[in-house]
Amino acid sequence: MTLAGRWLLRESRDPCARGIPDPTGALLVAAIPALLSFSVIEGPAWGWDNRWVVAGFGLAALLLPVLGWRSATARNPALDLELFRIRQYG
């Protein structure tokens, strides 16, 4: 951290932190938007019926409930489902 950062920023830690997030959940959190982005970006150029574009959408759709299940059952989920109970968030 730079000298200005040390002076301007305070250290903050989550007192409820319980370790590293679930690696499988983190992979799913990254993979699902990546698959959707790939399909949306390549769809116009390759055609919306291209097998890779359709596979990207399909795989993202299949992985979304897996992420929900993993987030509900993991000890330290990568995506805390309690966030969706906050009205301003969801």
Image: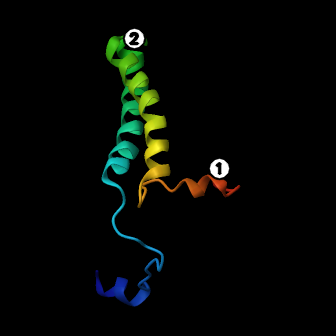
Q: Is residue 29 above or below residue 61?
A: below
Q: Is residue 29 above or below residue 43?
A: below
Q: Quadrant of the N terminus?
A: bottom left
Residue at 41% from the left image edge and 60% from the top image edge:
75
Taking depth in this image into account, of 14 and 33 the one nearest to the observer is 14
Percent position of residue 83, x then y: 59, 57
Q: Secondary structure at mark 2?
A: loop
> On residue 47, which mark appears?
2
Report how many numbered discs are placed on residues in the image: 2
**Quadrant of residue 62 in the image?**
top left
Give above or below for 75 relative to 62.
below
Of residues 5 and 55, the one drawn nearer to the viewer in this rendering = 55
- Mark 1 lies on residue: 90
Q: Residue at x 40, y 71 (%)?
A: 18
Residue, x 44% and y 82% (percent of image)?
12
Q: Residue extending furthest right? A: 87
**2 or 1: tag closer to the N-terminus:** 2
Query: Which residue type carries mark 1?
Result: Gly
What residue lies at 47% left-to-right and 36% top-to-bottom? 64
Residue 30 image offset from top left, x and y in percent: 36, 44
Task: Tell me whether the residue at label 2 lies in contact with that at label 1, contact meaning CB atoms closer than 8 angstroms.
Answer: no
Percent position of residue 61, x then y = 46, 28
Q: CA distance from mark 2 to mark 1?
A: 32 Å
